Every structure is written in C-alpha cells, then in structure tokens.
Image: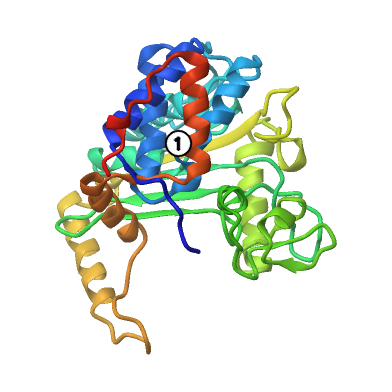
Amino acid sequence: MSVKTTGFFDPSELKRFCRALLEKVNIPPKDAELIAESLVRANLRGVDSHGVSRMAIYIERLKKGLVNPRPEIAILQQTPAMALVDGDNGCGQVVAKMAMELAMTKARETGVSLVGIRNSTHFGAAAFFSTMALERDMIGIALANSYATVAPWGSRVAYFGTNPLSVAVPTGRELPVVLDMATSVAAWGKIILAAQKGEAIPAGWAIDSDGEITTDAARALQGALMPFGGPKGSGISLIIDVLAGILTGAGYGPYVGDLYKSLDRPQNVGQMVGVIDISRFSDVNEFKNRMDKVIREIKSLPRAKGVSEILLPGEIEIRNQERREREGIPLPPTTVEELRKLSAEYGVPWEDAVKRN
C-alpha cells in the first residue's frame, strides 16, 4: 500500500506530546512516559498500527472511566516460577511491564518463569515486552489475546482476536532475533489505517460481512480478518486464547471488550509473559556465538528467484528504527488531525517544530 503522510515528525517530540496528554487524563508521569515510549517505539520500528494512532482511543477510554489510570496491580498467587497478576483494569503497558519484570526476577532464580495477567487492557506491540529480556541475556516471550476480529478457519464470523505473539532472542555480534506477529494475516490496526487513508488492502487479508474476500478496507471493518496459514494460524490463535485468556481467568474470544466499539465496559484483556534464563541451559557466550552462526548461515543460503536478501525476524524493524530516528516518523493526515484535536481539547501544545520537514 502507498503511504500518504503529512511529513516526518520528531520521535522525542511525539513522545513528549503523548506523555503530556496522558498526564492530562490522570496517568502518573512515570506510567505516561512508559506508554508514550511504547507507542513511539512502535512507530520507529515501522509498526504504525500500534503507534501514536492509538492515542485517541486510549484517551477516550480513559476519559470514559473504562481504564483505570492508577491501578493497584495485585499478585493473586505465585510460586517460585510463576505468578497470576490482576491488572485492576490498568493501562496494558503498565501492567505488562510489571509482569515482565516479575518474570525476569523469577527466571533468574528458577531458570524459566511464566506470569499470567487478567483484567488488563490493550498493551501495544508485544515486542516492547519480549525485548525487555534481551539486556539480561534472557529469552523473552509475550503474548496476548484481543477483541474478536478474526474468523476461525472455516467461519465467516469473527471470534478470535489478532492474538499477537512475540519472542526475543539475544545474539552476539548479529542483530537479535525478534519475532513479533499477529495470528491473523494482518493486524486489525492496518485495516483501520487503510480505511482512514481510503486505501485498498491486499486480497486475502480480510472478508466482508458476507464472508467474501474483499480489498475494501471499510467493508473489511464490517467483516473479519483471516487467520494466517489457514487452519494453522487459527489453531495457534486458539492456543494463545487458552494461555492468555482462559487459563488466567481473563476474557477470551468475543468476551474481550472491543477497544473501539465496547465503550461501555472494560476490556478484560488476557496476557502472558515468559522468560528463559539462557545461563541455566548453556554458557551465555556460547549460546550467542551459536545464534550468530545460525543467522550467518541462513543469510548466506542460496536465495530464491527475485530475492535480494534473506531477512530474519526483527531485522526490518531494526532498520526502520535506525532510519526513522534519523529522518523522523511519517504520520498520515488522519492521525495528525486526531492529535491536533487532542492538543486543542487538553491544551497540550502541538508545535510545528514537531515536524521535521
């Protein structure tokens, strides 16, 4: 899809703007910084569907009292290697960061840990949390369920969410391997962005309300996304709902509140984070050297016709981040207009200086 933008915006200024807006709706400064960082980093990595375009709905849900700006996050039960956390309907980023920090602490003691989360909300890009483990030479895992937008294989009605999964693996000299994927062919946010821009979507991304494949983003919003890989993606989506939702006591499938449509109730999103302490299985340097070796071997394999380079998970996103840190973040006119409206409503300056060119 072509991308229509109103120019390129300074990442640090965008983060400042988002942080100030969140503080206006009673989010504590430290939490506002975290949420703003997660959104802007998604934009930097090229995952615009989970970037600052989400600010308007975040603010609306906070304003309506559907998200708790100052949650009392509770550990309901725990053992040395696991915990179950109640997010008290707090912002998903805040809840998931607390859970990931707990998982890393436990994994250092036990080798492997899992922390389940219920009563949470949309937490942005899953890789934001899985990559937290990289600095500690650990493998990070983050998964979540979400509101129903995906038709199970063979159905024409949405039941699953896009149910993202991210795994981050540290390396030595090579770039870390960071898988971050939805279990749908495309993220729901990409359909929303395409509809806002008046752009077509690729055939195979979604079906309309009649169950017919459509390239019209507006019709897709009335229908459902398709699971990636047909029955395989559908099966993985179900398992993520089991782990993040049914196991934790959170909502699942259609019982997770729709971020955009369910403006009368909390979401009760379910999430699960996990950590593997590499040092309990292998010498860390040896592991990293072996990861470097496998990366180099894969990238040096004979390429298929028309392929200029073999890319590994996370590589495109890291290159996007390097480029956008230099050039700025491109934003579509609809997102800019939403941010300008929020600026006027809450008295947070949106200066032209934010725009780089």
Q: Helix, strand, or loop for circle 1? A: helix
Give the camera-side residue of 87 and 267.
Answer: 267
Give the camera-side residue of 196 and 298.
Answer: 196
Relative vertical location of residue 253 with respect to residue 265 in this rendering, above or below: below
Total label count? 1
Q: What residue occupies the far bottom of the structure in this picture?
A: 305
Percent x, y for residue 1? 50, 64
Residue 199 occupies quadrant: bottom right
Percent x, y for residue 211? 81, 64
Residue 252 occupies quadrant: top right
In this rendering, position of residue 343 left or right of residue 299: right
What type is the residue that disc 1 sits on? Val
Percent x, y for residue 172? 16, 55
Percent x, y for residue 255? 76, 36
Residue with the mark numbered 1? 52
On-image quarter of the C terminus:
top left
Residue 139 in view: no
- Please report the residue visible at 53 percent of the width from the left and 32 percent of the height from the top: 338
- Please report the residue visible at 57 percent of the width from the left and 58 percent of the height from the top: 186
Relative vertical location of residue 132 with respect to residue 294 in this rendering, above or below: above
- Please report the residue visible at 29 percent of the width from the left and 87 percent of the height from the top: 302
Q: What residue occupies the far right of the structure in this picture?
A: 210
Relative vertical location of residue 91 with respect to residue 195 in this rendering, above or below: above
